[in-house]
Image: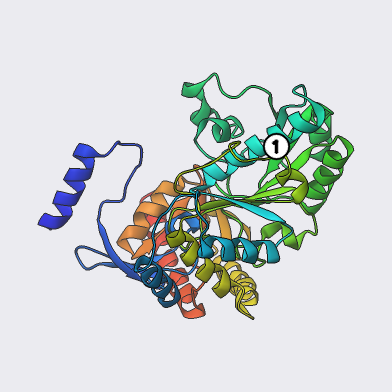
Amino acid sequence: MNQLNNAMELEQAHVLQTYGRAPFVLDHGQGCWVTDTDGNSYLDCVAGIAANALGHAHPALVAALTEQAGKLWHVSNLYHSEPQARLAQALCNSSFADRVYFCNSGAEANESALKFARKWAHDNFGPEKHAIVTFTSAFHGRTFGALSVTPREKYQAAFRPLLPGVRVAPFSDLPAAAGVIDDSVCAVIVEPVQGEGGIHPADESFLRGLRELCDQHNALLIFDEVQCGLGRTGTLWAHQATGVTPDLLTAAKPLAGGLPMGAVLMTERVAGAMHPGDHGSTFAGSPLVTAVAGAVLAHINQPGFLAGVVQKGAYLRERLEELNSPLITEVRGRGLMVGMDLTIPASRVVESGYRHGLLLVNAGPSTLRLVPPLIISHSEIDLLIERLTAVFTEVQEVQ
């Protein structure tokens, strides 16, 4: 208990207070489980907010990390790196992309994609073509450019003025999107499945329509797959289930299995606008993180893995429907990216979850988000349902 109190007191005394934290200190994890400093174990349905795709301390990732840590950690992008080159090849071979730009987070990936789009439009059409279209309830990050295309008052209000030239349309409303996309637009950025906005999959017809509008107006289509990409929805990339191909795609959270990493995948048409000195990042694509990311991608691409995500996702949603709680109004999602709309604040369910050995997280005020490691088993899903039943009973009793 002294260690617990000490860590919490130190954090509260010295760390910038921009997070609401759970009332315990996590010490170690294995698979889909984490244990705190008091020895309490929790089934992790947060996975570092969809980052720990292969759970905690996965043997393949530990091996890749250990091997590379004994060789080379960081050298900067002034030098060639084999783990980076191999990962870039694997990402291009697994997607629409011809080239990859590496960075350190999802927000940085989105910042980079916006910058690439502006540069492409400037070089090909001139400075007047600079507008960017985003959508209601989107979340693309908290840095200035990413925040500018995250049209949510609680995030933006205190930080205006933001990046100019941003237009907002309702999510999954194609006629409204058509009303703001014209020849002055350089890019449209959209999540194929909105994460922080409440786990809302975009309609296939909406994404297809955006592709057509972008082609019509010589604009680039950016898919933000920071949360929904890399197997989370049951295909390697969420957009692959729709048959709609972007010009750029941003990835991050699960890319290096929980280590800080981001990437922008793009076509050669976009990449041709960028030259040495146009963009860069000191720590981007280091040998250490790219070695681990290579192991993550190889594991997710193993035969049967993604089919397993589809099957377990369907089983999870089926079992969630069986909860039949009056507090639940809707269950939706794709693969192992599931949202539950509630009649009460989701924070109450999250807090009760701690008492029942569950790590849970919200996606908006009244949506519970379930994004467990992709390796979760059927028996662990059954245990999740058992514990959620107790959670909803407890919460309902104190209404």
- Answer with left or right where residue 214 lies relative to residue 169: right
- Residue 111 pos. (x, y %): 58, 38
Say whether residue 33 is visible.
Answer: yes
Of residue 127 and residue 168, the one placed in the foreground of this image is: 127
- Mark 1 Cα shell of 10 Å, populated few (<14), some (14-19), many (≥20): many
Residue in view at x 50 percent, y 31 percent: 155
> What colour scheme has been applied to the protein in the rendered image?
rainbow
Q: Residue at x 57, y 73 (%)?
A: 298
226 relative to 136, above or below: below
How many labels were placed on the picture?
A: 1
At a point 43% along the width and 58% down the height, the residue shown is 259
Q: Amino acid at mark 1?
A: Ala
Looking at the picture, how far across and down is residue 301, in whole percent?
Answer: 62, 73
In which quadrant of the rendered view does residue 38 lie? bottom left
Q: Position of residue 317 (x, y in %)?
A: 59, 67
- Image quadrant of residue 393? bottom left
Residue 190: x %, y % from top left: 68, 43
Q: Is residue 218 above or below residue 109?
A: above
Among the 4 quarters of the image, the one containing residue 94: bottom right
- Does 80 sit above or below residue 160? below
The outermost residue toward the top is 161
- Please name the residue shown 54% across and 60% down the image: 84
Residue 46 visible, this orientation:
no
Residue marked by disc 1: 117
- In the image, 138: left or right of 35? right
Residue at disc 1, secondary structure: helix
- Above or below 1: residue 234: below
Residue most toward the right?
216
